């Protein structure tokens, strides 16, 4: 007789996290950079990879990488925790500060992985609501934090999938509430480089705040799987206890460190994408859609005449793939388009115009 053991209930009842991939010509659904990383970067990484001592474990503390990231943000390497994508950073935070008997607070709609990873790690998830136009409402944050006293509070700025950037005063006010209720604040800045300001300014040695960043979006390196957080040294020390030994392989460490020698090229791309985002937003505003101003490399919009899911289907017929958020809670009818190259964005706009007008 064969038996199939069931996973624990919180996993058995769960749906996985998926982003449907369809074979299309214009892929604007996962917020990647439209161009690959700069050629000089690829050549420099390839040269260093040739010298790896393949029979040895990599540097467990990833010292060179963490020091390089630290220099970028003007902090010591012991205030940097790096992992395989910022998703692994978020998971490690929850494994360290969350878990059974604790609560994590999120403000919906926001990045689905915050609550998903919360549930996987056995953390109770408290869902607060964003206000009109998805703006964070400090009274709602106070209500949630004072009632559940979360171990971790997640913000996301620019927020995925809405693109909304929290004003600095709002983030500072949330941090005050987090201090009052004794938890840790995590600001997910996966799109931080596209935005006009950052929670990095609020960091301090005794401040219960961490800011997460990723190489996947801004730096055209989604293939490398590398993300990090900056926070107090005492948080980083706890995370290092929890994460698997040697989790960051030698190639990833090299790629992450060498990328920081090519910052000018990376920053030029970010500036070009911000300009292209503004062009795309302005063009969308001319069509029968609601559109929200974005501080990231994507734009959320809601067609007004035709159902969102139907528009998504007709776009795929025209070989254009965007993210279908139309059936997500609080985002009825909405679609999210990643800023691509000017040619890709024009194809998207042309197809959308054809469908809607
Ligand atoms: C894409 C994304 C991430 C995850 O990025 P990886 O570093 O590729 O794991 C984290 N947070 C937000 C808000 C994202 O959109």
Image: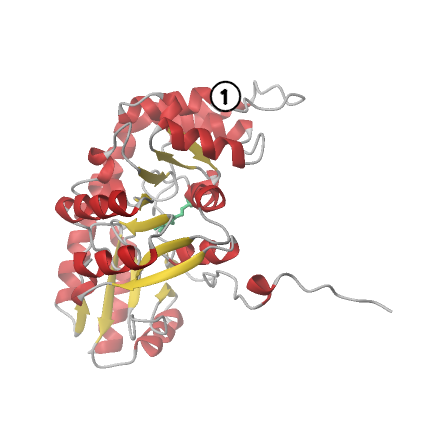
Q: From the top left corner, tell me how far across and down residue 53 is, in percent.
A: 62, 19
Q: Is residue 228 left or right of residue 305?
A: right
Q: Is residue 201 left or right of residue 66?
A: left
Q: Is mark 1 within 8 Å of ligand 1?
A: no
Q: From the top left corner, tell me how far across and down residue 191 is, in percent.
A: 29, 45
Q: Is residue 9 left or right of residue 221?
A: right
Q: From the top left corner, tell me how far across and down residue 188 is, in percent.
A: 32, 46
**In front here: 221 or 162?**
162
Quarter occupied by the N terminus = bottom right
**In front here: 338 or 163?**
163
Q: Is residue 136 left or right of residue 209?
A: left
**Crowding near pointer 1: few (<14 within 10 Å), some, many (20+)?**
few
Quarter occupied by the C terminus = bottom left
Q: From the top left corner, tell me how far across and down residue 78 is, in percent.
A: 39, 23
Q: How many marks?
A: 1
Q: Looking at the image, can residue 213 be seen? A: yes
Q: Which residue is mark 1?
A: 47
**In front here: 174 or 288?**
174
In the displayed structure, would residue 133 be above or below residue 170? below
Q: Residue at x 29, y 63 (%)?
A: 128
In the displayed structure, would residue 332 be above or below residue 215? below
Q: Looking at the image, can residue 40 be seen? A: no
Element under disc 1: helix
In the displayed structure, would residue 293 be above or below residue 255? below
Residue 326, quarter of the rendered image:
bottom left
Residue 81, quarter of the rendered image:
top left
Q: How is the image coloured?
A: secondary structure
């Amino acid at each position: 007789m064969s038996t199939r053991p069931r996973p624990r209930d919180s996993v058995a009842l769960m749906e996985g996290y998926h982003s449907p991939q369809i074979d299309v010509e214009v892929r604007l659904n996962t917020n990647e950079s439209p161009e690959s990383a700069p050629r000089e970067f690829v050549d420099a990484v390839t040269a260093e990879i040739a010298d790896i001592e393949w029979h040895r474990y990599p540097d467990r503390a990833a010292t060179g990488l963490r020091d390089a990231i630290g220099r970028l943000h003007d902090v010591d390497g012991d205030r940097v925790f790096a992992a395989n994508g910022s998703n692994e950073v978020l998971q490690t935070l929850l494994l360290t500060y969350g878990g059974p008997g604790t609560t994590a607070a999120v403000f919906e709609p926001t990045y689905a992985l915050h609550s998903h990873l919360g549930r996987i790690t056995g953390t109770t998830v408290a869902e607060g609501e964003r206000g009109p136009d998805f703006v964070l409402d400090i009274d709602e944050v106070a209500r949630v934090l004072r009632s559940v006293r979360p171990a971790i509070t997640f913000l996301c700025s620019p927020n995925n999938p809405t693109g909304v950037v929290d004003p600095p005063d709002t983030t500072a006010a949330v941090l005050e509430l987090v201090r009052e209720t004794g938890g840790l604040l995590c600001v997910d800045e996966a799109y931080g480089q596209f935005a006009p300001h950052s929670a990095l300014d609020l960091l301090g040695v005794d401040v219960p705040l961490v800011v997460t960043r990723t190489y996947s979006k801004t730096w055209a390196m989604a293939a490398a799987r590398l993300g990090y957080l900056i926070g107090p040294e005492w948080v980083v020390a706890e995370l290092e206890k929890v994460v698997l030994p040697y989790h960051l392989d030698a190639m990833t460490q090299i790629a992450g460190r060498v990328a920081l020698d090519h910052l000018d090229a990376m920053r030029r791309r970010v500036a070009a994408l911000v300009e292209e985002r503004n062009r795309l937003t302005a063009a969308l505003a001319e069509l029968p859609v609601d559109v929200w101003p974005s501080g990231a490399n994507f734009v959320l919009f809601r067609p007004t005449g035709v159902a969102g899911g139907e528009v998504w289907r007709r776009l795929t017929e025209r070989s254009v793939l965007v993210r279908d958020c139309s059936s997500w809670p609080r985002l009825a009818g909405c679609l999210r388009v990643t800023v691509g190259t000017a040619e890709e964005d024009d194809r998207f706009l042309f197809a959308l115009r054809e469908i809607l007008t």
